[in-house]
Amino acid sequence: MPKRRPIADRTPGGRERVRIIGGTHRGRVIEFLPLSGLRPTPDRIRETLFNWLRTILPGADCLDLFAGSGVLGLEAASRGARRVVLVDHAAEAAARIARYIAQFELHGVSVHCGDALAWLRGPAQGFDVVFLDPPFSSDLLEPCCQLLDRGGWLKPAARIYLEMDRHRPLPSLPPGWRVIREKKAGQVCYYLCLSDLIDDHASADLPGCGRSD
């Protein structure tokens, strides 16, 4: 039986690392501590995700709500996002992300240390793209989706990325949200949702729509 390819390389010091795979910072290495529940999105899933987003990401405002290693938010910045906000509850993770923001000289990118649900109950900002990749053992996807929808966090026709264990059912989505892309890879099932859907004819004209790859 072939061995499963690791999602991150391990450094001699015990840290793990991933690489940005596209954009102006392609090839840059991100090291992170193997904290409990931290599971970076694998390269091949990120490649698919950012292909889905390629027409809307340049100039977009993005939120990475369970930032972890920071690779999704930093990849979005590398690929042309105008503004990226990363949030993580672990102080160690947030501090490391802040160092990479400075090291890569990323403008319009910020990181905040805090609880995701508490953060979403604060003053809202509008985002075009939201990444939701909480720990697989948590039940945070559904309440996060509801708070995003009700709290004014989403711009019209926003895209929301959901990543979860493939053996768990997709949580109930807010009214007006629709899954427009979905795929499985290993133990992961991941979705791209579109919010503020008015009708099928309108959605057909929006970039990044279409269920099949």
Image: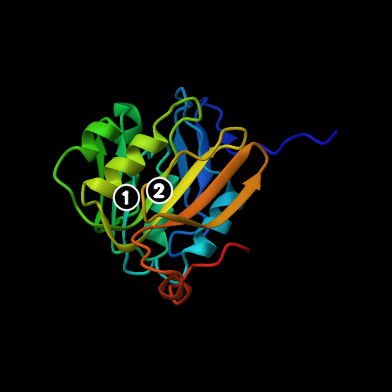
Q: Residue at x 35, y 53 (%)?
A: 104
Q: Earlier in the sequence, mark 2 or mark 1?
A: 1
Across and down, in percent, residue 162 comes to 47, 45
- The structure's colour scheme is rainbow
Instruction: Locate the N terminus by quadrant.
Output: top right
In the image: residue 61, left or right of residue 191: left
Nearer to me, 23 or 29: 23
Furthest residue to the top?
Answer: 36
In the image: residue 100, left or right of residue 22: left
Nearer to me, 86 or 120: 120
Nearer to me, 39 or 94: 39
In the image: residue 87, left or right of residue 25: left
Judging by the rendered image, the residue that carries numbered circle 2 is: 131
* Residue type highlighted by circle 1: Leu
Q: Quadrant of residue 194?
A: bottom left
* Residue type highlighted by circle 2: Phe
Determine whether 48 is above or below 68 in the image.
below
Q: Quadrant of residue 95?
A: top left
Instruction: Locate the C terminus by quadrant.
Output: bottom right
Instruction: Give the SS element for disc 2.
Output: strand
Determine whether 90 is above or below 164 in the image.
above
Q: Residue at x 33, y 39 (%)?
A: 144
Nearer to me, 150 or 175: 175
Judging by the rendered image, the residue that carries numbered circle 1 is: 63
Across and down, in percent, residue 84 comes to 30, 54
Q: Residue at x 32, y 50 (%)?
A: 63
